[in-house]
Amino acid sequence: MSRARSMSGTIPSMETSHDNLKDNTIIIVLGASGDLAKKKTFPALFALFRQGFLPRDAKIVGYARTKMEKDDFEGRATSYIKGAAEDKEIANAVESFKLTLSYVAGSYEDGAAFDGLTKHLDEIEAKYQSKERNRIFYLALPPSVFIPVAKNIKEHCYNSKGGVNRIIIEKPFGKDLDSARELLNTVKQYWTEDETFRIDHYLGKEMVKNLLVLRFANVALGAAWDKNSISNVQITFKEPFGTEGRGGYFDEFGIIRDVLQNHLLQVLSVLTMERPVSFSAEDIRDEKVKVLRCIPPIERSDTLLGQYVAANGKPGYLDDTTVPPQSVCPTFAATTLWIHNPRWEGVPFVLKAGKALNESKVEVRIQFKEVTQGIFKDIARNELVIRIQPNEAVYLKLNSKTPGLHTRAIPTEMDLTYKRRFLETKIPEAYEALILDALRGDHSNFVRHDELDVAWKIFTPILHWIDGQSGPRPHPVQYPYGSRGPKELADFMAKYGYKRSDDAYFWPVTNLAAL
Ligand SMILES: NC(=O)C1=CN([C@@H]2O[C@H](COP(=O)(O)OP(=O)(O)OC[C@H]3O[C@@H](n4cnc5c(N)ncnc54)[C@H](OP(=O)(O)O)[C@@H]3O)[C@@H](O)[C@H]2O)C=CC1
Ligand SMILES: O=C1O[C@H](COP(=O)(O)O)[C@@H](O)[C@H](O)[C@H]1O
């Protein structure tokens, strides 16, 4: 056992899987000409390739409607790989990576086109030594073609002669409870749950994965993790840019479907679930489903909606030519969820997300209750902040005596900033981690069908209200591009007990002489 391992402890069931694919594997990226494939999927595959995590002699086949020569495809698939211009080792790795790539053009609806893809896969596999043949189908595609593609690859490209077939699909998984059920049930006609890997890329983020360890490997945190100690929790997603050309897609979905119903709810479920029996995928997902089932549908009165308008030289949402004029689609939403179980009864969980805000930030902020009055007065509350991105960190804001001859408490922090604590560590991209999990057959960081069902139950009533399916559509309040969001946010947060006391908090240093 290595020194590092014996020092840090192991989590055995997280490290091994009986379905780990070691060789004879083809990864087929459908939608290979698209944005997701170019920006996320291929760079993640390259990173795995370079670190030796792809199965031995793995091949990557792109498939899309666009006709492309091999060179064009290779150029596109490697265009988002960073560092090749400055680093010879990366440049050489890119050249080796290109040798694994090939491309087939074809439509998504036409079965015969998929026969063409199969012929290409068979030719590659004919060179493999053993009989086992594994095919991983990654759908980097818009939802409109999920169903025909899931059907066509099952009927035309599925390898039933031995080996593993898996399908990886991306959100959006439907638009509400009914459409999600229809989508899930249709895909299920062709692919078993075991073969299906539904990506929510937030589950692949390092700090989201860390939640399980922070919570369950630390007695001190575990002891304070309930309604007795915690006043309120915020899970916040902030992006400093607007829809910028993606307005056509966004307007159909809105910020709740884009971020809250999936990414932030996933974070909430890992943050609040009970301790799983083991780290196996089903044990973890059972606990996530259990806690989600304790959350009733969100009330309209627990919701604040916003839409950004032009400010600071930046265009408003309605100025985006791909957005319908007069659209009332929310680009900001804050919603409060309540968990009716003994651990969390009465604690508000505020999920808030917005486009065109003042900064880029995703964080969990747990605000603890007030210390009992008596010896202290107006003292800041403790806060535990888990910053998911950028610049991963966990910090606990706590009161400490100011050094000196008088006794006075001042807010300070215990700070675990990853960049400082872990030297020479590259934090993997979420997609790298998730594709590797799919190759290993580990479902723990993928969304199970019943998780999705319960997630849609929580959000569907307010989504129908916002869409105008249950009466007049609500009008989001306006907020300026580049601001913190609607001015109504401060009162909204105060309603759920959040107390901001940052006037006494100085970071990174406190100059006592200036106080
Ligand atoms: N390891 C590290 O890197 C550490 C960094 N720090 C830094 O210290 C600073 C303060 O930390 P912290 O207190 O945690 O974070 P912030 O002051 O950024 O935010 C604290 C909370 O107050 C809200 N808020 C921010 N501005 C306003 C405002 N004008 N009116 C009302 N509410 C507001 C935020 O909401 P919202 O997010 O919605 O705007 C958030 O919920 C930050 O810059 C932080 O990055 C502190 C400790 C460790
Ligand atoms: O799924 C989505 O996520 C991105 C944000 O992802 P991140 O990894 O950069 O945090 C968001 O911009 C996009 O609108 C949404 O569809």
Image (cartoon, rainbow, N blue to C red):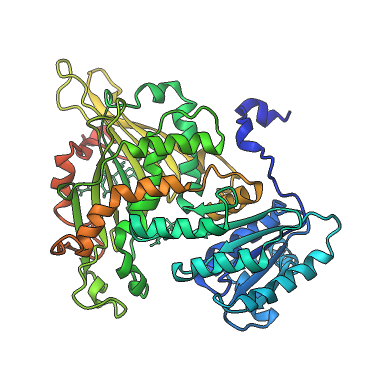
Answer yes or no: is residue 238 visible. no
What is the x, y in percent for residue 371? 21, 22
Camera-nearest residue between 410 and 36: 36
Please state the quadrant of the image where ligand 1 appears.
Answer: top left
Residue 397's image quarter?
A: top left
**For the N terminus, which image quadrant?**
top right
Residue 315's image quarter?
A: bottom left
Q: Would residue 286 appear left or right of 246 to someone viewing this image?
A: right
The residue lying at 47 percent from left, 27 percent from top is 216
Q: Residue furthest right?
A: 129
Residue 244's image quarter?
A: bottom left
What is the x, y in percent for residue 300? 17, 50
The residue lying at 35 percent from left, 27 percent from top is 225
Q: Would residue 316 appear left or right of 215 to someone viewing this image?
A: left
Camera-nearest residue between 53 and 311: 53
Answer yes or no: is residue 225 visible. yes
What is the x, y in percent for residue 293? 34, 38
Q: Residue furthest front?
A: 189
Is residue 438 positioned above or below 137 on the image? above
- Count how many numbered circles sit on residues in the image: 0
**For the C terminus, which image quadrant?**
top left
Q: Would residue 415 appear left or right of 213 to someone viewing this image?
A: left
The residue lying at 20 percent from left, 68 percent from top is 328
What is the x, y in percent for residue 343? 31, 26
